[in-house]
């Protein structure tokens, strides 16, 4: 009797699993997504760099009561206002700003699923797309970057979702706010003309950004961010050539040669590996065939491919700097479409193969999913860190951790900067790591100011600087020098002259 009860219990569990397998799969995939986005989050990438420093500074200013609508390069202010909420919870630090992009990355998966339920009834396509977006090196990387690029994809998905649900006023508001996320979103303004309700709710935001950002840039400065990107000095023929070259570079970066920038990518690595590239091509054929053969697919597919094009339009328009294309950051608005197309290809392959042998097909698909996950995992957590400056050694973090351990009564100085690869450690990085610690910073050209400051102190002074750098004006003082792998500490003890 006991054995029979156990069998019934096991049968009941399997029945529940079978009935809720879609929900269980989604829960597991979202847990996997969360794991990939938080695993070693504090260590990969490990160092704060230029743009992120500026966002930390702007967010701190917001929390101090200063409101602003300015752009830093192509980055708008929306990301910093969102980051301010996470600073209140997790502190004003590098990890908190990365947690902000992790949160955005998870929201992207949720809204992708809502969109998929609207555009297709095939569960395999829905779940496959979410899995591919979950394990994507591209999306994992930007979900951990502490940069607003990932927010562009979220706003693209917001717009798709509200538009498909005929929430046109909300769609226009999303387009309007998206203008202040990142300049790579600006190509989406074409969708404001699809419906008078969208245009009406979008217009105030466009007017604001035109008067505040676009108008003065276009009229007053050919060397501004916008003027420089649009080829102010180029001939008409050169502009057209560079524009189409950018389109080609973006398209071929999906499966041939990717972004050269090391911050968010293994240099030159395309978005998709060989397996997914084949499925992308196959899926694109299916997508176009459905568009012209299935009546109710024409509008949806035409809309989706338009989003794919115009979400990258700002990237196409960077005609002054063709070497900057492809740029995965400025292409990220196309993320949903790319993985949806891949899932169409996988789906077509799956349904063809299962007609031959269902069991073999399921095993083969499981193998493909496993391969995709582990390849992306290995590439991101083992290969990618080695391509970062100094093999991802965070000079600024290590130095500031050491500063925090030192006696608080000692005056601490950082002298010089940027002696590592690509300018590590940056002075602003050191100051942003030291959220509460008070230090003085002197650049190499401020040697006289440094010497005068040290000579006027009546207590011990600790100077952090590049390894093997001597400060000549302190030769006559008693100095204890401690050399590390890449920096040294000079302890000037109570300025005792010999």
Image: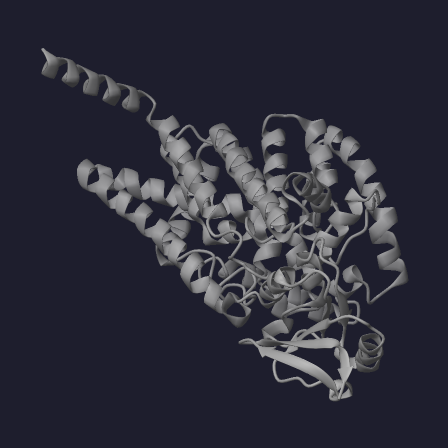
- Measured as percent of width and height from the top left, residue 119 is found at 49, 31
Depicted 58 relative to depicted 444: above or below: above
Quarter holding residue 89: top right
Q: Quadrant for the C terminus, please.
A: bottom right
Q: Quadrant for the N terminus, please.
A: top left
**Camera-nearest residue between 412 and 497:** 497
- Measured as percent of width and height from the top left, residue 164 is found at 58, 29
Quarter holding residue 272: bottom left
How many marks the image carries: the answer is 0
Depicted 107 relative to depicted 418: above or below: above
Q: Is residue 113 left or right of residue 212?
A: left
Question: Is residue 317 visible to the viewer in this orientation of the structure?
Answer: no
Residue at left offset 85%, top offset 58%: 217
- Measured as percent of width and height from the top left, residue 8 is found at 17, 15
- Measured as percent of width and height from the top left, residue 496 is found at 76, 81
Residue at left offset 40%, top offset 42%: 343
**Camera-nearest residue between 482 and 286:** 482
């Amino acid at each position: 009797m006991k054995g029979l009860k156990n069998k019934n219990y096991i049968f009941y569990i399997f029945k529940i699993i079978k009935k809720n397998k879609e929900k269980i799969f989604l829960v597991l995939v979202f847990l996997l997504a969360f794991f990939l986005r938080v695993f070693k989050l504090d260590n990969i990438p490990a160092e704060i760099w230029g743009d992120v420093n500026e966002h930390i500074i702007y967010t701190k200013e917001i929390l101090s009561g200063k409101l602003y609508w300015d752009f830093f390069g192509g980055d708008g202010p929306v990301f910093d206002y969102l980051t301010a909420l996470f600073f209140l919870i997790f502190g004003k630090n590098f990890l908190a700003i990365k947690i902000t992009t992790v949160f955005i990355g998870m929201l992207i998966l949720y809204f992708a699923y809502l969109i998929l339920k609207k555009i297709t009834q095939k569960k395999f396509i829905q779940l496959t797309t979410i899995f591919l977006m979950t394990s994507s090196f591209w999306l994992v990387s930007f979900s951990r970057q502490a940069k607003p690029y990932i927010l562009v994809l979220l706003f693209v998905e917001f717009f798709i979702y509200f538009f498909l649900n005929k929430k046109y006023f909300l769609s226009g508001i999303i387009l309007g706010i998206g203008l202040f996320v990142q300049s790579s979103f600006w190509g989406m303004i074409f969708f404001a003309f699809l419906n008078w309700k969208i245009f009406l709710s979008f217009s105030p935001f466009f007017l604001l950004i035109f008067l505040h950002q676009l108008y003065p840039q276009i009229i007053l400065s050919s060397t501004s961010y916008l003027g420089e990107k649009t080829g102010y000095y180029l001939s008409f023929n050169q502009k057209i050539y560079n524009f189409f070259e950018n389109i080609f570079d973006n398209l071929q970066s999906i499966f041939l040669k990717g972004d050269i920038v090391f911050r968010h990518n293994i240099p030159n690595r395309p978005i998709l590996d060989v397996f997914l590239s084949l499925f992308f091509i196959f899926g694109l054929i299916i997508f176009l065939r459905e568009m012209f053969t299935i009546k109710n697919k024409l509008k949806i597919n035409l809309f989706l491919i338009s989003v794919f094009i115009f979400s990258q339009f700002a990237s196409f328009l960077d005609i002054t700097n063709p070497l900057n294309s492809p740029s995965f950051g400025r292409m990220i608005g196309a993320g949903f479409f790319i993985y949806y197309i891949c899932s169409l290809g996988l789906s077509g392959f799956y349904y063809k193969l299962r007609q031959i042998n269902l069991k073999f097909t399921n095993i083969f698909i499981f193998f493909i999913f496993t391969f995709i996950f582990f390849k992306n995992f290995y590439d991101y957590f083992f290969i990618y860190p080695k391509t970062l400056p100094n093999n991802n050694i965070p000079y600024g973090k290590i130095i500031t951790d050491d500063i925090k351990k030192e006696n608080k009564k000692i005056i601490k100085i950082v002298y010089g900067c940027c002696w590592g690869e690509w300018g590590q450690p940056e002075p602003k990085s050191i100051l942003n790591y030291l959220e509460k610690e008070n230090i003085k910073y002197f650049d190499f050209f401020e040697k006289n100011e440094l010497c005068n400051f040290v000579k006027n102190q009546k207590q011990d002074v600790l100077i952090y600087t590049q390894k093997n750098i001597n400060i000549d004006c302190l030769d006559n003082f008693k100095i204890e020098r401690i050399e590390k792998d890449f920096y040294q500490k000079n302890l000037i003890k109570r300025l005792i002259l010999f």
